[in-house]
Image (cartoon, grey):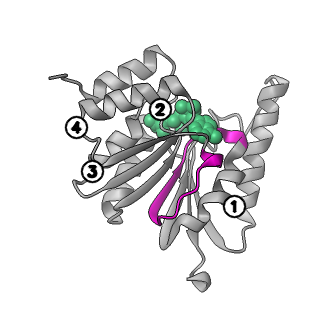
């Protein structure tokens, strides 16, 4: 028997600099899942499986599909999910999310992968959202850099610009309404406009 605790995953992420969700961000996400009776979740960006394990633990009838393109992360996630006995409810797909075709519908789509591709993830997977479902996106403040990136490298500035583009894309979206919440590293909650339901 492998005994593993959530705090072991948090420690691993800290030591190996894996960008798992921040404490208040994940707590907000778990509360949201509980309060909105969310059952079927799609996650873009598994890393070591931390957030998918936490989400699956909210309730025994929750199912998570999660996508990861990095082989080391994928292997680590598979190992962790087995150790938590959640391999029957968490399905990890080893692929670039932009190459994955899914037919199922989800109550929650959680976008937590390459920030430069947020609009592409959104456009690709919005068809997999239930009418009353929600798309939650992480890291919209990017450690505060979206507010002020004056002292950053060119690369970082470019990434900040991509995040700002995503924020503007959500703000101006005809089909979806978005709330922006400054918890964790900045989270957005996006739902279909009621006239589209
Ligand atoms: N959701 C995790 C953290 C994910 S970190 C948690 O909170 O526990 C982001 C992960 O997304 C990284 O492991 C990275 O390899 C993966 N990723 C980035 N772009 C991706 C893409 N296009 N397709 C699949 N995975 C991607
Ligand atoms: Mg994140």
How dense is the environment of label 4, judged by Cα within 10 Å: few (below 14), some, or many (20 and up)?
few
Residue where numbered disc 3 is placed: 58
How dense is the environment of label 2, judged by Cα within 10 Å: few (below 14), some, or many (20 and up)?
many
How dense is the environment of label 3, judged by Cα within 10 Å: few (below 14), some, or many (20 and up)?
some
Please state the horizontal and vertical placement of residue 197, each as a whole percent of the image: 55, 83
Please state the horizontal and vertical placement of residue 38, each as a whole percent of the image: 36, 62
Region in magenta = 97-116
Work out whether mark 3 precedes mark 4 in sequence or the reverse, and give the earlier one.
Answer: 3
Whether residue 159 is situated above or below residue 28 in the rendered picture:
above
Tell whether 135 sits left or right of 117. Answer: left
Residue where numbered disc 4 is placed: 85
Please state the horizontal and vertical placement of residue 196, each as a whole percent of the image: 61, 82
- The label shown at residue 20 is 2
Work out whether mark 1 precedes mark 3 in sequence or the reverse, and give the earlier one.
Answer: 3
Residue at the limit of the structure toward the right, as seen here = 154
Work out whether mark 3 precedes mark 2 in sequence or the reverse, and give the earlier one.
Answer: 2
State the CA–CA distance, disc 1 to disc 4: 37 Å
Whether residue 24 is situated above or below residue 83 in the rendered picture:
below
Tell us which disc is closer to us: 1 or 3: 3
State the CA–CA distance, disc 3 to disc 2: 18 Å
How dense is the environment of label 1, judged by Cα within 10 Å: few (below 14), some, or many (20 and up)?
many
State the CA–CA distance, disc 2 to disc 1: 23 Å
Tell whether 68 sits left or right of 92. Answer: right
Tell whether 185 sits left or right of 174. Answer: left
Q: Secondary structure at mark 3?
A: loop
Work out whether mark 4 precedes mark 2 in sequence or the reverse, and give the earlier one.
Answer: 2
Tell whether 150 sits left or right of 41. Answer: right
């Amino acid at each position: 028997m492998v005994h593993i605790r959530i705090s072991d995953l948090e420690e691993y992420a800290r030591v190996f600099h894996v960008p798992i969700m921040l404490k208040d961000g994940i707590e907000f996400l778990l509360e949201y899942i509980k309060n909105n009776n969310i059952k079927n979740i799609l996650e873009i960006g598994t890393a070591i499986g931390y957030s998918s394990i936490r989400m699956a633990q909210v309730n025994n009838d929750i199912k998570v599909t999660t996508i990861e393109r990095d082989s080391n992360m994928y292997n680590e996630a598979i190992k962790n999910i087995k150790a938590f006995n959640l391999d029957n409810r968490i399905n990890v797909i080893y692929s670039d999310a932009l190459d994955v075709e899914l037919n199922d519908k989800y109550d929650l789509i959680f976008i937590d992968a390459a920030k430069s591709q947020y609009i592409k993830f959104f456009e690709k997977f919005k068809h997999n959202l239930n009418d009353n479902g929600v798309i939650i996106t992480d890291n919209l403040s990017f450690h505060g850099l979206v507010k002020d990136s004056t002292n950053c490298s060119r690369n970082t500035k470019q990434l900040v610009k991509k995040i700002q583009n995503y924020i503007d894309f959500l703000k101006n979206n005809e089909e979806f309404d978005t709330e922006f919440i400054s918890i964790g590293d900045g989270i957005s909650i996006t739902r279909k406009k009621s006239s589209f339901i």
